[in-house]
Amino acid sequence: MELKPLLITRLCNASVWPILAGVIVIALRGDLPVVAVVGGALVCLVAAVYLGFLGWRLGVVCDAGGIDVHGLFRSRRIAKEEIVAITNFPAVRWKTRAGKARWTPIFAFANLGRVLPLVERHNEAAISILKDWFEDPKPQAPKKKQRQRRTR
């Protein structure tokens, strides 16, 4: 199962970085030589494209073995048996095999202010789906019925 933010959220996550890079280049262009501005613009452009890509792919992928949380700067795979809870923050609380408590935020469904009710409802629904996935017991193989032999 793959959960992604709404299209409008994905577009905002992807476009904020190029806009920020443009603002930085415009702010620096008057104080630096042309070569430095062009070099800085290229560095900002490459960083903006990379961060825009990461912002576009924010989300969660769940399967029987665990969860992949795609964050803004990194992604993490967490085995289902290590997960302790899915919180409303939203985050995944989990323990390492050594027993150390950890948590991984799910930025894809964070409500950073009550801007659009549609986005808020989508994010709450996604967290609810994740909680249901986590609480769903592991499927067990059906037991085979043994035939009883009739004695005569």
Image (tube, rainbow, N blue to C red):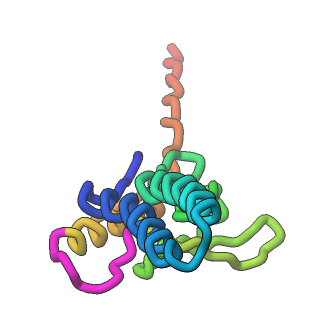
Residue nearest the observer in this picture, 144 or 149 = 144
99 left or right of 117? right
Q: Residue at x 29, y 72 (%)?
A: 124
65 left or right of 24? right
Where 60 sits versus 29, above or below?
above
Q: Residue at x 37, y 69 (%)?
A: 109
Residue nearest the observer in this picture, 84 or 124 = 124
Q: Hey, which residue is sitting farthest top in the picture?
A: 152
In which image quadrant can residue 12 be found? Answer: bottom left
Q: Position of residue 37 (x, y in %)?
A: 57, 65
Q: Position of residue 86 (x, y in %)?
A: 48, 72
In which image quadrant can residue 55 be found? Answer: bottom left
Q: Is residue 140 visible?
A: yes
Q: Residue at x 35, y 82 (%)?
A: 112
User: Which span of residues is magenta-colored?
Assistant: 109-118
Residue nearest the observer in this picture, 114 or 27 = 27
In which image quadrant can residue 111 be found? Answer: bottom left
Q: Residue at x 47, y 66 (%)?
A: 21
Q: Hey, which residue is sitting farthest left in the picture?
A: 117
Q: Position of residue 148 (x, y in %)?
A: 51, 24
28 left or right of 99? left
Query: Is 41 colored magenta in this rendering?
Result: no
Query: Is 112 colored magenta in this rendering?
Result: yes
